[in-house]
Amino acid sequence: MRGLAAGAGVALGSPMVLAQTAPKVVVIGGGFAGASFARAIKREDPQIAVALIEPNAHYTACPLSNAVIAGLRDMEAQHFGYAGIEADGIVHVQQKAIGIDPEQRRVVLTDEVRLSYDRLIVAPGIDMRLDAIPGYDANAAERMPHAWKAGEQTLLLRRQLEAMEDGGLVVISAPANPFRCPPGPYERASLIAHYLKANKPRSKILILDAKEAFSKQRLFEAGWAALYPGMIEWVSLSFGGAVTEVDVATRTLRTEFGDHRAAVANVIPPQRAGAIAALAGVADRTGWCPIDPVTFESRLVPNIHVLGDAVIGGAMPKSAFSANAQAKAGADAVIALLRGRDPSAPKLINTCYSLLAPDYGISIAGVYSPKDGLLAEVEGAGGTSPLDASLAERAEEAAYGEAWFDTITAEAFG
């Protein structure tokens, strides 16, 4: 790190040997969006100096983490290091960004070193809005885990399920849109049901939902009826699904229609863009980041681009697949801007695979392009798995999901 920068206004330099005029791109956030962007832009234009600011030594992936909760996968399989990124000539700055000076185009790090940039990429993922549900805060999350950032929370929820007595009630609270991975709560319910069916068959799952409908709903409900009859109950917003308060001491979730006392409570709160987005001034009052859908440049602060879960993506959902697609399109746009060319309008694809059992997968796909200042779905270009697919086809979808995970993690982390 010390070879990269020193003083108040610094340029990226050693260990990369670059001309003083080489464009400098700094990326904040080493998840799917940030890592994919850093590798894509460096490979497409090796002369650009790229630094990735990420304080962690490895990334813990959220896709397939529901399988960890259900005891089907080890947490180690979710860990990915940054050696592949460094091998591409990208400097991994293992510090936290604590401030941004958009006027001087500098990022302030924890040791007060400042990195200068020509273009800054902010890919901070999400933060939990721990003030959104009365009674639910950081301490409450240690009793009623959200497990919506893969890691210790994932393992905590797994341990709670393992410790629960047969016949216990698992309550999952799903937030209103937008939030990371729209099908995620329902995949989680499915895989928890798979675990309970094999180990604690008298137990039940209750999903309290702050929405009237959810992604791939007909496919999930058909799968639940076939695989876990009578085990999973879903309660919509209009029937009292919105959690208004939690009592941590008794693991009780309150709604306008009544109280639900859980043996295990998985509270997934509303979310917002990661904290650095607010510090950078690129998040609006919604907590998310408005962007130009062609370049992903912030509509609030020039020369800063936002990618991944943090963006207001229009019809495009918040997912690892979306983050990776946005990163590659964003890399093309930033290269064009740095080289004085007009960026081309992107066409972006998202596919989301969900597991209902180890050999039972479903998916939804969409294609998106800029329209009226947002990313709009291209009509007729997407779709879901057939409702009447055979078990063999469901097994193929599950295998496709595993293969996709291997592909996207290789693209992002090497």
Image (cartoon, rainbow, N blue to C red):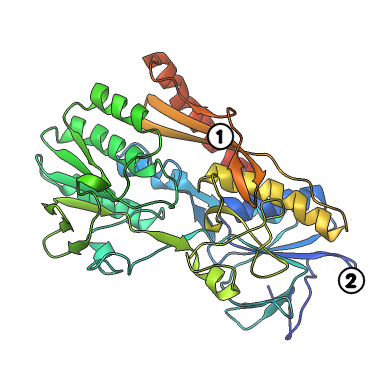
Residue type highlighted by circle 1: Gly
Question: What residue occupies the far front of the structure in this picture?
Answer: 372
In the shown orientation, is residue 229 left or right of residue 127? left
Which residue is rendered at x = 57% and y = 79% of the image? 110
Disc 1 residue crowd, few under 14, some 14–19, many 20+, Cα 10 Å: many
Number of the label disc, if any, that sits on residue 322? none
For the residue pair 380 and 409, the one nearer the viewer reads as 380
Q: Nearer the viewer, residue 55 or 404?
A: 404
- Label 2 crowding class (10 Å Cα cut-off): few <14, some 14-19, many 20+? few
The residue sitting at the bottom extreme is 8
Q: Amino acid at mark 2?
A: Gln
Task: Judge whether residue 115 can be spotted in this image.
Answer: yes
x and y percent of residue 414 in the render? 64, 45
Q: Whole-Å distance between the Cαs marked 1 and 2?
A: 42 Å
Q: Nearer the viewer, residue 167 or 17?
A: 167
Mark sitting on residue 20: 2
Instruction: Name the front one of labels 1 and 2.
Output: 1
Q: Residue at x 90, y 68 (%)?
A: 21
- Residue 366, disc: 1
Q: In which quadrant is the N terminus drawn?
A: bottom right
Quarter residue 268 falls in: bottom left
Q: Is residue 128 left or right of residue 49?
A: left
Relative to residue 370, is residue 153 depicted above or below?
below
Q: Earlier in the sequence, mark 1 or mark 2?
A: 2
Residue 82 showing in the rendered view: no
Asked whether the beta carbons under mark 1 and mark 2 sit within 8 Å of each other, the answer is: no
> Could you tell me which secondary element the residue under label 1 belongs to?
strand
Q: Where in the figure is residue 318, as x and y percent of width and height?
A: 50, 48
Tell me if residue 318 comes above or below residue 20 in the rendering. Answer: above
